[in-house]
C-alpha cells in the first residue's frame, strides 16, 4: 500500500516527579531529606531510512508518544529517563504543522536524525530544598509536561529520472523492462494509480532510480485527473523523461506541448529540469511511418534529426542527440523512438539516461 500523506499527533514524554524521602538508617537519628530527581521524559526524533519507502506504517495512528520519565526514589536515586520515540520515515518526507501549514522539517538525507520534540524535565527531589530554616522539606517538584504537536507528513519521492506522460503511453512497461520494479501493466488508461520506484542497473556498480508517475492529462495542474495529486512527487527528481505515444490518436507534438504546459503551471523549477524525450510504441507502426512521425516531431520542436550517437541508437530510426560537453538544458538531451515491448533502443536509452543523470548530479553538486 502506498501512503503519501498522513496526519497524526506526536507527544514527548512527561518528566518524572521528584521524590519526597528521608533517610532512615541505623545510627543516623537525624537523617535528612534524600528524595531523588525524576527522570527526563522521552524525546521525539525523526530518522530517515532509505529502506523505508512509504508512510503506510503510520496509517490509522492518531497519537504517538514517547515514554514518561520515572519518578525519583529515596537515597537520591534519579528516576529512569523515558524511552525516546523514533519515527522512521523515507527520504523525501516533509513535516508540516497540520493547523498552520508551516513546513517544520524537510527530511532528505539517508541516516538523518532530527530532534523534533524534547521531553519534559524531571522534577527535583526534596533534598534540593533543604535549608537552615527548613531542615525537613516535605515537598518536591512535579515533572514538566512533554510537548505535543499536530502534524502532517507528506512524502515526495526522490528519483534520478521521473517518467512524465499521458495515461497509457508505456511508462509502466518501460520501468518494468529497465528496472526491478513490478508495476501493474494493462491496455487501458490510469493503470498506475500510485507512484512506483525502480532501480536501473547500468553496470556492476552504477545505477539510477526511476519513478513511474500516474498519467498526466490536460488540466492536471488545476486538479483534473490523478496528475495533480502526484505531480509533487516529481518535484524532487533530478531529470525528466517525457514519454510521447507515437501511435496514439493524440498528436505527438500536442502531447509534448500539453505536458510542458502542465509542468510549468505546477512549478517553474520543475519545468526547468534537465530532460529528454522518448517516442514510445513504435512496434505498433511500420518503420517508414515511425521515421516520418519521428522526423516531423523533431522538426516540430525546432530541431533537426541527427547529432552524436555515443549510445548505440538504432540508425534505422531518426533521432536527435546533443553533445554531452555542449549540452543546452533548455533543449532535450535526446529525442529517441523506442519500444519497450520489442526492446528497440532500450539498452541505448538506459545508457543515455544514465549520462543525463550524471549531468544533473553534477549540476546539483555545483549548486551546493
Image (tube, rainbow, N blue to C red):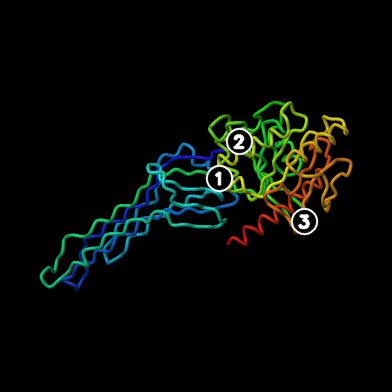
The earlier-in-sequence mark between 1 and 2 is 1
Spatial CA span between label 2 and label 3: 30 Å
Q: Position of residue 323 (x, y in %)?
A: 78, 55
Give the residue displayed 66% in from the left and 59% down from the top. Answer: 362
Q: Nearer the viewer, residue 31 or 363?
A: 363
Tag 1 residue: 156
Residue 23 visible to the viewer: no
* Residue at 67% from the left image edge and 41% from the top image edge: 163
The front one of 268 and 20 is 268
Instruction: Give x and y (percent) for residue 274.
Output: 67, 50
Can you see residue 367?
yes
Q: Which quadrant is home to the C terminus? A: bottom right
Q: CA distance from mark 1 to mark 2?
A: 12 Å
Quadrant of res 266 = top right
Q: CA distance from mark 1 to mark 3?
A: 28 Å
Q: Is residue 12 left or right of residue 250?
A: left
Q: Which residue is mark 2?
A: 194
| Lower position in the chain sequence, tag 2 or tag 3 | 2
Amino acid at each position: 500500500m502506498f501512503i503519501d500523506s498522513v496526519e497524526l499527533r506526536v507527544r514527548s514524554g512527561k518528566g518524572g516527579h521528584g521524590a519526597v524521602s528521608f533517610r532512615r538508617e541505623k545510627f543516623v537519628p537525624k537523617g535528612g531529606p534524600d528524595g531523588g530527581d525524576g527522570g527526563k521524559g522521552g524525546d521525539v526524533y525523526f530518522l530517515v531510512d532509505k529502506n523505508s519507502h512509504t508512510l503506510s506504517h503510520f496509517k490509522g495512528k492518531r497519537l504517538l508518544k514517547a515514554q514518561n520519565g520515572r519518578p525519583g526514589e529515596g537515597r537520591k536515586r534519579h528516576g529512569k529517563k523515558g524511552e525516546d520515540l523514533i519515527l522512521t520515515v523515507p527520504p523525501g518526507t516533509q513535516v508540516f504543522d497540520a493547523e498552520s501549514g508551516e513546513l517544520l522539517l524537510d527530511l532528505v538525507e539517508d541516516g538523518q536524525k532530527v530532534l523534533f520534540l524534547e521531553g519534559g524535565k524531571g522534577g527535583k527531589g526534596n533534598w534540593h530544598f533543604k535549608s537552615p530554616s527548613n531542615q525537613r522539606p516535605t515537598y518536591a517538584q512535579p515533572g514538566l509536561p512533554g510537548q505535543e504537536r499536530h502534524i502532517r507528513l507528506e512524502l515526495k519521492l526522490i528519483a534520478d529520472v521521473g517518467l512524465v506522460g499521458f495515461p497509457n503511453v508505456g511508462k509502466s512497461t518501460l520501468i518494468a523492462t529497465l528496472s526491478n520494479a513490478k508495476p501493474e501493466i494493462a491496455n487501458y488508461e490510469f493503470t498506475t494509480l500510485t507512484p512506483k520506484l525502480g532501480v536501473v542497473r547500468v553496470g556492476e556498480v552504477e545505477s539510477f532510480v526511476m519513478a513511474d508517475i500516474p498519467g498526466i492529462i490536460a488540466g492536471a495542474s488545476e486538479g483534473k485527473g490523478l496528475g495533480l495529486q502526484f505531480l509533487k512527487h516529481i518535484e524532487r527528481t533530478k531529470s525528466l523523461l517525457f514519454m510521447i505515444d507515437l501511435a496514439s490518436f493524440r498528436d505527438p507534438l500536442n502531447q509534448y506541448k500539453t505536458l510542458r504546459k502542465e509542468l510549468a503551471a505546477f512549478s517553474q523549477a520543475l519545468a526547468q529540469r534537465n530532460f529528454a524525450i522518448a517516442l514510445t510504441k513504435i512496434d505498433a507502426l511500420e518503420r517508414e511511418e515511425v521515421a516520418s512521425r519521428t522526423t516531423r516531431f523533431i522538426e516540430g520542436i525546432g530541431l533537426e534529426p541527427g547529432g552524436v550517437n555515443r549510445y548505440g541508437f538504432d540508425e534505422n530510426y531518426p533521432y536527435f542527440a546533443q553533445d554531452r560537453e555542449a549540452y543546452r538544458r533548455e533543449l532535450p538531451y535526446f529525442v529517441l523512438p523506442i519500444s519497450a515491448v520489442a526492446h528497440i533502443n532500450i539498452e541505448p536509452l538506459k545508457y543515455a539516461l544514465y549520462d543525463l543523470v550524471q549531468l544533473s548530479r553534477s549540476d546539483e553538486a555545483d549548486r551546493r
